[in-house]
Image (cartoon, grey):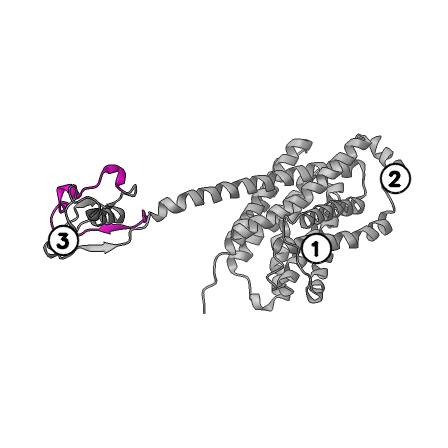
């Protein structure tokens, strides 16, 4: 049965009468697919289904008393063909809008849910991470622990075949290790900053990432060419806003400021390296690439954390943290939640990147930073002056303008 196919009639008269009164099938035998077709004189008639036509021709052999013979119908149809020279038969598929709307709606809802989860996980990660670092000031140990949580989740994902396990070659591994080093340093420096200054200030400084993206791309990626005037112009409010927010920040600390700025350097260095050393094998997608980087980062950071801070998961240090506001159970639970949110929010980010364009993802990342800053100010009751708010807002507007300026193509000479 072909319900999506129909006869499109274009006669010069208003309506096409059936060739025989007895050849009209019952309503229950008509196709459920009905739609409108246009006549040459802009009149509309109902579409006849292929099923109706097929039934008219085939029913003549079943009951001669109820239906006319095939010859009569053939003659009638030939008469119609002669009378209506412009009879046209075409396939009339279902409306593309009707077919695509449900899918588009589902995709939109799915994308909206992913963005909501991404923002929510970032809020919880920054809150739990800050709470732990305030009473347990060992950022290298905490970062290694977070990479360890991610490694466990990745191992379970591959073990239960929730996601295909990649086959890593030596050439791939050689390209990934520098990315993992930059990824490790970037996250470690971010945690150092979060332990020293307010969450809102750390994320305001991290709004400077586009500045280093343009700088490193111009220096290391010769094929990119010079940035457009719109891109350069968008960097002005970013730099000015971060400077204004830094001068008026109540929790300003040079270690916190310097480590956040250094994390911008390492993260953008990682992005540039990923473009220069891009792994082209189809078996290694974004999620698996991030998973492999997480495991390598964990392997690299565990010995580094022991060298930098010593072994800090001892009862003495845990009791010391408990005396500063979090008992041992709360410290462990919030550390686990921070590690879970840390890994999951980045996996969700890569999933969103597969569904939208990089520009849309960049705008979403800008909104995420706004959400994190506002939520942390409210939760921790961070004192914010009007000038500080102006600087933060100016920097975030600059980030948004940068994401839009990246879409403007330079005019050819």
Whether residue 124 is visible, yes or no, is yes
Is disc 1 placed on a helix, strand or loop?
helix
Nearest to the observer: residue 58 or residue 207: 58
Q: In this image, 252 relative to 357: left or right?
A: right
Of tags 1 and 3, the one toward the viewer is: 3
Task: Report the magenta residues as a range.
Answer: 1-30
Residue 278 percent coordinates (x, y): 63, 63
Q: Which residue is mark 2?
A: 314
Q: Residues within 10 Å of mark 3 (few under 14, many from 20)?
A: few
Vertically, is 341 above or below 57? above
Q: Which mark is residue 71?
A: 3
Q: Are marks 1 and 3 in contact (CB under 8 Å)?
A: no
Q: Magenta: predominant secondary structure element?
A: loop
**Residue 246 rendering spot, x and y as whole percentages:** 68, 44
- Count residues near mark 1 (Cα–Cα under 10 Å), then give few for <14, some for 14-19, many for 20+: many
Q: Quadrant of residue 124?
A: top right
As helix, strand or loop, the secondary structure at mark 3 comes to: helix
Residue that carries the numbered disc 1 in the rendered image:
293
In this rendered view, identify the residue nearer to me: 47 or 192.
47
Q: Nearer the viewer, residue 59 or 258?
A: 59
Q: Is residue 209 above or below residue 342?
A: below
**Spatial distance from mark 1 to mark 3, Cα to Cα?**
76 Å
Q: CA distance from mark 2 to mark 1?
A: 28 Å
Q: Confirm whether the magenta stretch covers residue 8.
A: yes
- Position in image of residue 312 (x %, y %): 86, 42
Alpha carbon distance from label 2 to label 3: 97 Å
Q: Which residue is located at x 81 percent, y 43 percent?
A: 138
The x, y position of residue 93, in whole percent, is 32, 50
């Amino acid at each position: 049965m072909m319900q999506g196919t129909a006869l499109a009639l274009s006669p010069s008269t208003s309506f096409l009468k059936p060739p025989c009164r007895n050849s009209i099938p019952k309503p229950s035998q008509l196709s459920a697919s009905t739609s409108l077709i246009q006549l040459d004189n802009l009149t509309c008639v109902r579409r006849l289904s292929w099923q109706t036509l097929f039934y008219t021709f085939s029913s003549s052999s079943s009951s001669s008393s109820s239906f006319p013979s095939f010859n009569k119908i053939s003659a009638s149809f030939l008469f119609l063909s002669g009378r209506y020279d412009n009879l046209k038969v075409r396939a009339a598929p279902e409306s593309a809008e009707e077919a695509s709307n449900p899918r588009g709606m589902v995709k939109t809802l799915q994308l909206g849910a992913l963005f909501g989860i991404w923002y929510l996980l970032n809020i919880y990660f920054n809150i739990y991470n800050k709470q732990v670092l305030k009473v347990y000031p060992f950022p290298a140990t905490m970062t290694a622990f977070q990479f360890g949580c991610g490694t466990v989740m990745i191992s379970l994902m591959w073990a239960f075949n929730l996601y295909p396990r990649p086959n890593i070659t030596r050439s791939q591994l050689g390209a990934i290790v520098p990315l993992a080093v930059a990824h490790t340093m970037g996250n470690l420096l971010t945690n150092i900053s979060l332990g020293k200054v307010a969450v809102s200030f750390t994320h305001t400084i991290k709004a400077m990432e586009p500045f280093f993206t343009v700088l490193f791309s111009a220096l290391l990626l010769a094929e990119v060419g010079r940035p457009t005037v719109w891109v350069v112009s968008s960097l002005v409010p970013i730099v000015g806003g971060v400077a204004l927010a830094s001068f008026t920040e109540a929790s300003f600390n040079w270690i916190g400021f310097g480590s956040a700025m250094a994390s911008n350097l390492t993260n953008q260095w990682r992005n540039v390296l990923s473009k220069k050393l891009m792994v082209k094998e189809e078996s290694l997608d974004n999620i698996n690439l991030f998973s492999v980087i997480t495991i390598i980062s964990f392997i690299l950071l565990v010995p580094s954390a022991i060298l930098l801070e010593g072994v800090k998961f001892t009862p003495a240090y845990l009791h010391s943290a408990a005396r500063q506001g979090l008992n041992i159970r709360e410290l462990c639970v919030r550390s686990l939640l921070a590690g879970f949110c840390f890994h999951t929010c980045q996996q969700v980010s890569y999933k969103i990147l597969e569904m939208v364009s990089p520009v849309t993802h960049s705008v979403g990342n800008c909104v995420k930073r706004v959400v994190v800053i506002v939520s942390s100010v409210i939760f921790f009751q961070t004192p914010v002056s009007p000038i500080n708010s102006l600087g933060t807002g100016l920097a975030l507007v600059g980030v948004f303008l940068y994401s839009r300026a990246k879409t403007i193509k330079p005019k050819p000479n």
